[in-house]
Amino acid sequence: MRIDFHASPSPTLGVEWELALVDRRTRDLRNDASHLFARARHRLPEPDRLHQELLRNTVEVVTGVCETVPEAMAQLRGTLVPVLSAADELGLDLYGGGTHPFASWTAQELTEGHRYRELMDRTQWWGRQMLIWGVHVHVGLPEQSRVMPVLTALLTYYPHLQALSASSPIWAGVDTGYASNRALMFQQLPTAGLPFHFQEWAEFEAFARDQLTTGVIDDLSEIRWDLRPACHLGTLENRVCDGVSTVEDLAALTALMHCLVVDLDTRLAAGERLPTMPPWHVQENKWRAARYGLEAIVIVDEQSTERLVTDDLADLLERLAPVAERLGCSAELASVARIPERGASYQRQRAVARAHEGDLVAVVDSVVRELRSSLEPVR
């Protein structure tokens, strides 16, 4: 089976940001995406940058094909400001977390569509539990033959991205003890979770052929790996991150993902052997980052060296600084270091819960407030 990767001549960028809809009074989820669409779309400069998702409590804002992180963030702001205005009229707020702290899955409604009904019919209880939101970042790659080596090498930095973005500590009214409950929930779906360690494009083609032949998937888009090639776009799609509650954090994470992919691809093109780790180390790192977040001690190489993730992150940011300068995102990459300083979203949510004696409405208030404040004009 032949799969063509429609390569990108430059390291273009695209961002998809999933956001939940919450009621302004109760702070519970509301199944009103269709009403928000009807009210907001005519106000948008680019209506196709607002999407519906699996559940009617969710909207997704997306960019077009961008060259830089600042361009991508400007596009997202341009979409979100009128969407927020429309949400205000409906008594809705946008919520940027990986999970909602107290909503019940039994009250959520499925978006109309044959594809979504089939997914629910197949996945049953686990599929219906998927009250989760994330961020997807696409980076263009110029050569099909380099996609799989770059993807596999990028798994070395999986825990850094997971720890920085973790924003799903509370589920169904209970603190799970995990920084990212979303990461471990999503991998319960068939074809979701960590990708296989492929080095050659032909290995991916053989995998896809087997999946299609045995009916595991009907389409390549149903390969729901945390990192996957988007063949029709010519990008490597990074789906590691939890939902994000501020434009600043989103810009930082996007810059880190952009720089990592470009750095790895540049080194591979120059003939360097890229760093990889055994799949058992990658799997353990995912669990450690999901469980402990920024306090995780992670495995950083194939020799089983371990480091505190924030220590390794500091060295990584220094190494990527020249790449960020070339890509026009130096300020955004530098702001990655501020996430551990002020606390990741999972830490901020827990701090609010403690300060309000476990009041989870206050947690939703805080996440909503962070998003709205981050969209206010800089004075």
Image: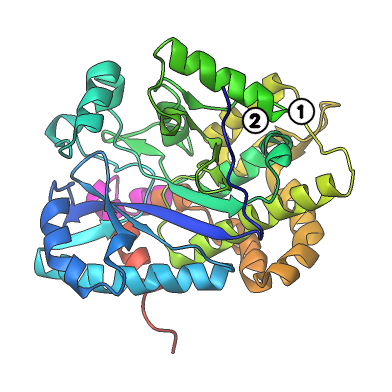
Indicate which label's residue lies in the foreground, 1 or 2.
Answer: 1
Residue 114's x, y, as percent? 20, 30
**Residue 302 sits in quarter:** top right
Q: Which residues are magenta?
A: 350-364
Asked whether, in this view, residue 83 is left or right of residue 72, the answer is left
**Residue 272 sits in quarter:** top right
Which residue ends up furthest to the front in the rendered image?
A: 2
**Which residue is identified by label 2?**
285
Asked whether residue 24 is in view, the answer is: no
Q: Amino acid at mark 1?
A: Met
Asked whether residue 29 is in view, the answer is: yes
- The majority secondary structure of the magenta stretch comes to helix
Residue 222's x, y, as percent? 41, 29
Q: Amino acid at mark 2?
A: Asn
**Which residue is identified by label 1?**
277
Classed neighbour count for the residue bearing mark 2: other residues with Cα under 10 Å, few (<14), some (14–19), many (≥20): many
